[in-house]
C-alpha cells in the first residue's frame, strides 16, 4: 500500500509540473517497465512468455519488452485517470510532424515539440486499429479505381501511363501506411514517411505531364529525373545521416505547397473543362481535411483519434480524384483523335 501511495505522489507531482507530459518519462511508467522486464523477459520467464504468446503476435514482431511497455502504459493511464489528471501521451509521432508528412503547412500555435502519441487499445496485433483499417480501405479504394480506370480508359490515351503509375505509387503508400499503423517500428515508420513523400512528388510529376509534358516530353523527362534525384537525396539523408523530423516537416510542406499551387493554377486556367471542378474539390479537401490532425484529443474508446478520422475522410477523396483522372484522360483521348482527323 505504501509503495502504491508513493507512486501516486510521484505521478501527481509530475502531472502538476507539466500538463500532458510524455507518459513514458513518468517514474511510475519507468518503474513498472523495469519490474515487468525483470520479471518476464529473461531466463525461464522469457521462455514461458514465448510459449504462451499467440503466433500472430510473434509473427508481427511483438516482443516481451513491447508487451511490458503496453501493459505499463495502461497502468500509468489508469493512475492518471484515477487521480483526475488528463490522459498522458507516450512515445510516438507529433501532430505537427504528421502534417509535414502530408505536405501540409502548419499554422503557428502550441503544437507538441516532442514525439507524443495517445495510448491506443491494441486489437490482435494491430497497434492502431482504426488507422490501420482506414489505411487499408484507402488502398482498396485506390485499387478499385485503378481497375475502373484501366477498364474505361484505352492505353492510347496520352495520360494513361502516368495515371496508372500514380495509382501504383498510391497503392504502395497505403500498403506501408497500413503496415506502419499495424506495427510501429523504425523500418515501418521510414517506409510510411518515404512513400508518403513519393506520392506527393508523383502528384507534382502528374501535374507537370498534364500541363507541359504532353506538348514538351523532354521537359517532363528532365523534371522526372530531377524529382527522382530529390527523392533519392531525401531518403538517403534521413536513412544514412540523421532521421530529422524537423527537416522532413519542412521538405514535405514545401513540396506540398508546390503541388497545391500548381494544380490550382492549372484548374483556374482550364476552368472551361467540365471535369475540372473535381480536381479543385480534391485539392482543397485534402488541404482542409488534413487540418483534422490539429485536433489533439484522447482516442474515442481508445481506438479512434484525429489521425484515424483523417484517414477515413480521405477515402471518398481518392475516389473523386481518380474519377477526375478518368474524365480528363478520356477528354484528352477525344481531343487527340479530333486533332488527328483534322490533320
Image (spheres, grey):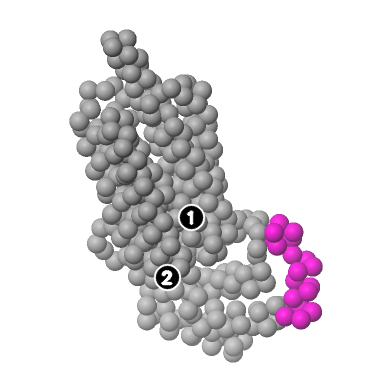
Q: Main secondary structure of the magenta part?
A: helix
The residue where tag 2 is placed is: 241
Quadrant location of the C terminus in the rendered image: top left
Mark carried by residue 336: none
Q: Is residue 221 visible?
A: yes
CA gap, disc 2 to disc 1? 18 Å
Numbered tag placed on residue 192 in the rendering: 1
Helix, strand or loop at disc 1? helix
Residue 334 sits inside the magenta stretch: no
* Front in this rendered view, residue 23 or 288: 288
Instruction: Give the residue at the far left of this rendering.
Output: 269
Queried whether the magenta region covers residue 47, the answer comes back as: yes
Number of marks in the image?
A: 2
Residue drawn at (29%, 15%) of the image: 339
Question: Image point 54% across, 44% down: which residue?
Answer: 136
Q: Residue at x 54, y 88 (%)?
A: 6
Q: Is residue 111 above or below residue 22?
A: above
- Please tell me how crowded label 2 is: few (under 14), some (14-19), or many (20+) other residues with Cα within 10 Å: few
Residue range highlighted in magenta = 42-59
- The furthest residue to the top: 341
Mark 1 is surrounded, within 10 Å at the Cα level, by few (under 14), some (14 to 19) or many (20 or more) other residues, namely: many
Amino acid at each position: 500500500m505504501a509503495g502504491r501511495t508513493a507512486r501516486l505522489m510521484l505521478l501527481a507531482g509530475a502531472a502538476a509540473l507539466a500538463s500532458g507530459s510524455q507518459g513514458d518519462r513518468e517514474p511510475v511508467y519507468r518503474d513498472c517497465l523495469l519490474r515487468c522486464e525483470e520479471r518476464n523477459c529473461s531466463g525461464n520467464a522469457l521462455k514461458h512468455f514465448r510459449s504462451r504468446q499467440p503466433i500472430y503476435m510473434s509473427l508481427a514482431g511483438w516482443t516481451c519488452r513491447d508487451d511490458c511497455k503496453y501493459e505499463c502504459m495502461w497502468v500509468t493511464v489508469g493512475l492518471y485517470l484515477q487521480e483526475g489528471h488528463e490522459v498522458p501521451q507516450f512515445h510516438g509521432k507529433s501532430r505537427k510532424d504528421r502534417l509535414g508528412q502530408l505536405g501540409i503547412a502548419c499554422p503557428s500555435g502550441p503544437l507538441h515539440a516532442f514525439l507524443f502519441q495517445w495510448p491506443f487499445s491494441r486489437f490482435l496485433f494491430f497497434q492502431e486499429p482504426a488507422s490501420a483499417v482506414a489505411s487499408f480501405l484507402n488502398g482498396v479504394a485506390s485499387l478499385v479505381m485503378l481497375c475502373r480506370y484501366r477498364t474505361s480508359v484505352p492505353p492510347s490515351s496520352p495520360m494513361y501511363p502516368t495515371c496508372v503509375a500514380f495509382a501504383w505509387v498510391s497503392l504502395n503508400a497505403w500498403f506501408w501506411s497500413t503496415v506502419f499503423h499495424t506495427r510501429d517500428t523504425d523500418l515501418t515508420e521510414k517506409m510510411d514517411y518515404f512513400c508518403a513523400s513519393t506520392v506527393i512528388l508523383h502528384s507534382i510529376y502528374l501535374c507537370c505531364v498534364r500541363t507541359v509534358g504532353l506538348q514538351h516530353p523532354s521537359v517532363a523527362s528532365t523534371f522526372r529525373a530531377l524529382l527522382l534525384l530529390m527523392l533519392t537525396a531525401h531518403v538517403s539523408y534521413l536513412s544514412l545521416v540523421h532521421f530529422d523530423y524537423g527537416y522532413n516537416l519542412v521538405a514535405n510542406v514545401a513540396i506540398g505547397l508546390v503541388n497545391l499551387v500548381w494544380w490550382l493554377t492549372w484548374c483556374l486556367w482550364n476552368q472551361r473543362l467540365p471535369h475540372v471542378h473535381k480536381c479543385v474539390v480534391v485539392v482543397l479537401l485534402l488541404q482542409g481535411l488534413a487540418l483534422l490532425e490539429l485536433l489533439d484529443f484522447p482516442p474515442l474508446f481508445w481506438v479512434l483519434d484525429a489521425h484515424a478520422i483523417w484517414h477515413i475522410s480521405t477515402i471518398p477523396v481518392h475516389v473523386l480524384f481518380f474519377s477526375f483522372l478518368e474524365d480528363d484522360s478520356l477528354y484528352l483521348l477525344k481531343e487527340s483523335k479530333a486533332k488527328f482527323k483534322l490533320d
